[in-house]
Amino acid sequence: MKKIDVSQIRQTVRELCLKANFELRSDILKALKGALRKETNPRAKSILNTIIENARIAKSERLAICQDTGIVIVHIEVGQDVGLVGGSLHKAINDGVKEAYTKGCLRKSVVSDHLLRKNTNTNTPAIIHSEIVRGDRVKIDVSPKGFGSENKSKMMMFKPTASIREIKDFIIDVVKNAGPDACPPFVLGIGIGGTFEIAPGLAKRALLRPIDKKNPDRRLAKLEKELIGRINALGMGPMALGGKTTVLGVNILDYPTHIAGLPVAVNMSCHATRGASKTL
């Protein structure tokens, strides 16, 4: 059995937090540049130029892409042939986040109590999703998630008789209601199926997939393409001030569900959709 000391995980999480906050994902940057080439609205072109320039400065100067450096979402897949040694996995992850946010002078946004609103001053605890998979590797995905877009996310428990049209209209309405508050152009993570807690998790995980990577499910790929077309036809554009690009990508994950239900969740993400990953 392969042994991995949790200190390696702590160091990796620290590195990934800094990278994600300083370097915009390459697929997102590519999509922004593509949108700029297609855009004809002068105001939209100016906004896209500013977003792209902001990403360039953040990377070169090692500054945060956005002032909201988010709550850290960590997806970790642990191979069943791996033995984790040297301490607690969750503590190692949270220590890595704490070190990164201190070292990078990143804003600490986590409060310990939802009503008292006392800041933990460490940006921890992180949100940790762990999964046991086959193999002898550990894959870590880190996603700092800002709350301008998170606050505009929605979930609907549809009746099992709901039509695909009703689902599409719900997703479009979520985008419309998000407007400028969620900082378009957006990336949408959509989860369909499962249960009340599974659908939002699918939506969150869907954001990890590069938006230039086609969905392997042909039916879902077709739905993603249709939604992109309909959303961009709204004309909201960058920062909802008009233009051709309201959404950069739509990623869908699904899961089997109960005969009596049809959960659908939409996780909104802004133009600063951040993430970094590494496999140990």
Image (tube, rainbow, N blue to C red):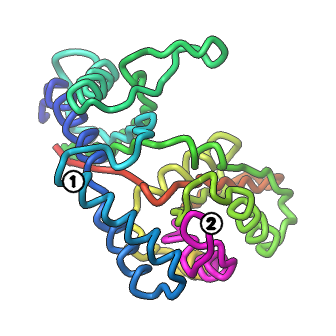
**In the depicted view, which residue is nearer to us: 140 or 175?**
175
The answer to whether residue 94 is above or below residue 241 is: above
**Quadrant showing the N terminus:** top left
Q: Which mark is residue 59?
A: 1
Distance CA(mark 2)–CA(mark 1)? 26 Å
Q: What is the three-letter code of the residue carrying label 2?
A: Ala
Count of marks, rendered view: 2
> What is the secondary structure assignment of the residue under circle 1?
helix
Which type of secondary structure does the marked residue at label 2 adopt? helix
Q: Quadrant of the C terminus?
A: top left
Residue 248 numbered tag: none
Q: Position of residue 267 (x, y in %)?
A: 59, 52
Residue visible at 46% across and 73% down in the picture: 215
Q: Residue at x 17, y 21 (%)?
A: 85
Residue 219 shows in the view: no
230 within the magenta span: yes
Residue for point 55% across, 56% down: 183
Closer to the chain start, of discs 2 and 1, is: 1
Density class for disc 1 (Cα within 10 Å; few <14, some 14-19, many ≥20) is: some
Per the rendered image, the range of residues in magenta is 226-252
Please name the residue shown 40% across and 22% down the image: 124
Picture quarter containing residue 120? top left
Residue at mark 2: 240
Quadrant hosting residue 52: bottom left
* Residue sitting nearer the eye, 65 or 19: 65
| Residue 60: x %, y % from top left | 17, 54
Is 160 included in the stretch rendered in magenta?
Answer: no
Q: Is residue 81 left or right of residue 257?
A: left
Residue 150 appears in the figure: yes
On the image, the x and y values in percent for residue 275 come to: 34, 50
Q: Residues within 10 Å of mark 2 (few under 14, many from 20)?
A: many
Amino acid on which disc 1 is placed: Lys
